Image (cartoon, helix red, strand yellow):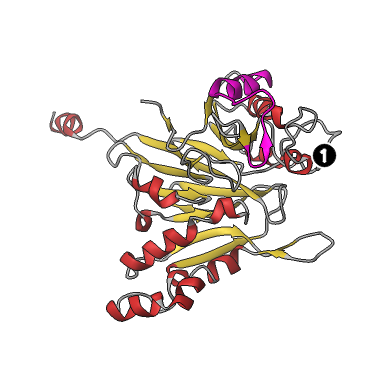
């Protein structure tokens, strides 16, 4: 009876949970409607901590720190940042995040920044895409302006190297098979090579509450038609191994921007993105429950994306949903807006 009473009195174990939040849904370097740049926050925990035991940021476009503050998640509360690639619209917010962390939490643990190793581009003019160098030099403008010296004098607890000293860069060589690149407790992050620019990688987060794939701007290895799909075979592999991912978060371009539609959108840029329709087909094949379309090209409600004009006028969320459904996806379609979230399990 004493044993039975003790068992009855023991608190129930808190259920694990996963929350995926878009910290920015803007597509490309353009600005529209106050949207933040590309980024996805993944939080894992249980009901006792509000799914906040582990906080992982994937890409950090402009305004990331502002969107995080609305959740609220502060810069020093992030455990790691993962970058899909080194385009400005995916990294502009890093300087802000590291500057804030350096300012107010220099005595705390340094932030893990996980990304591809230096990647030489195969082009007529040789260059290297380097996440490592981006982080190493992230505070150079502040150092040259004198701010870091001035701030260091007023608070000698701040790290001498400036914002870059608040980070630890962990690089990996992306390949065609998923590889674990970061882990913490029950959370495992895997990466795979994907095409867009040199050094592009896509990620998968596995937790006891569920899994999510973040595809970034991944596209097909074949840079233009004829091809079966605009989506990445590697991302599809990531979404199916070791089992079907619950959520796929992926940049999306609407078919109306195609070179045959009259928008004037550059064909090479269109072809290195994944269309919403092909993403719907991929998500259905992968067995995903949720497809989150982000980094939208074009943004909702605008008649122009960069210099390209939409031939039929602005698109709505329904237009993107219809495009993804046309690919055959029967699950939940979420059209990206800043701070939209998907929770596993749903409340």
Q: Nearer the viewer, residue 143 or 199?
A: 143
**In the rendered structure, does residue 16 fall within the stretch colored magenta?**
no
Residue 165's place in the image compared with 175, above or below, is below
- Which residue is rendered at x = 18% and y = 29% of the image? 8
- Which residue is rendered at x = 59% and y = 18% of the image? 330
Is residue 185 visible in the rendered image? The answer is: no
- Which residue is rendered at x = 42% and y = 55% of the image? 79
Q: Which of 58 and 272 is in front in this view?
A: 272
Please give left or right for residue 10 compared with residue 332 in the image.
left
Residue 299 in percent (x, y) is at 57, 34
Please give left or right for residue 28 compared with residue 70 in the image.
right
Q: Kindly identify which residue carries mark 1.
A: 224
Q: In which quarter of the image is the N terminus?
A: top left
Q: Hey, which quadrant is residue 50 in on the image? A: top left
Q: In which quarter of the image is the C terminus?
A: top left
Question: Quick one: SS at disc 1?
Answer: loop
Q: How crowded is mark 1: few (under 14 residues within 10 Å), some or many (20 or more)?
A: some
Residue 110's place in the image compared with 189, above or below, is below
- Which residue is rendered at x = 54% and y = 58% of the image? 114
Residue 290's place in the image compared with 180, above or below, is above
Residue 345 in percent (x, y) is at 41, 29
Residue 106's place in the image compared with 233, above or below, is below
First to last magenta residue range: 305-329
Residue 196 in percent (x, y) is at 71, 47
């Amino acid at each position: 009876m004493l044993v039975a009473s003790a068992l009855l009195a023991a608190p129930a174990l808190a259920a694990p949970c996963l929350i995926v939040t878009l910290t920015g849904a803007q597509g490309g370097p353009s600005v529209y409607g106050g949207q933040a740049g590309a980024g996805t926050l993944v939080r894992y925990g249980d009901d006792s901590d509000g799914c906040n035991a582990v906080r992982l940021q994937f890409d950090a476009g402009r305004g990331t720190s502002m969107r995080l503050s609305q959740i609220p998640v502060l810069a020093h509360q992030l455990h790691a940042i993962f970058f899909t690639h080194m385009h400005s619209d995916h990294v502009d917010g890093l300087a802000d995040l590291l500057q804030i962390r350096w300012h107010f939490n220099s005595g705390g643990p340094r932030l893990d920044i996980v990304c591809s190793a230096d990647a030489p581009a195969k082009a007529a003019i040789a260059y290297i895409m380097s996440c490592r160098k981006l982080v190493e030099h992230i505070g150079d403008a502040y150092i040259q302006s004198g701010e870091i010296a001035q701030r260091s004098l007023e608070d000698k607890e701040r790290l001498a190297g400036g914002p870059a000293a608040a980070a630890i860069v962990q690089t990996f060589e992306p390949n065609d098979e998923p590889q674990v690149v970061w882990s913490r407790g029950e959370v495992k992050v895997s990466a795979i090579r994907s095409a867009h620019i040199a050094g592009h990688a896509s990620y998968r987060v596995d937790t006891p509450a569920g899994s999510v794939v973040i595809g970034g701007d991944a596209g097909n290895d074949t840079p233009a038609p004829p091809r079966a799909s605009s989506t990445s075979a590697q991302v599809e592999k990531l979404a199916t191994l070791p089992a079907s991912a619950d959520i796929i978060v992926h940049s999306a371009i609407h078919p109306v921007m195609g070179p045959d539609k009259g928008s004037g959108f550059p064909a090479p840029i269109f072809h290195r993105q994944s269309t919403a329709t092909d993403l719907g087909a991929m998500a259905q094949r992968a067995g995903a429950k949720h497809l989150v379309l982000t980094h939208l090209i074009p943004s909702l409600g605008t008649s122009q994306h960069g210099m390209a004009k939409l031939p039929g006028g602005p698109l709505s969320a329904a237009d993107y949903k219809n495009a993804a459904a046309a690919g055959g996806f029967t699950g939940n379609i979420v059209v990206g807006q800043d701070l939209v979230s998907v929770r596993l399990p749903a409340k």
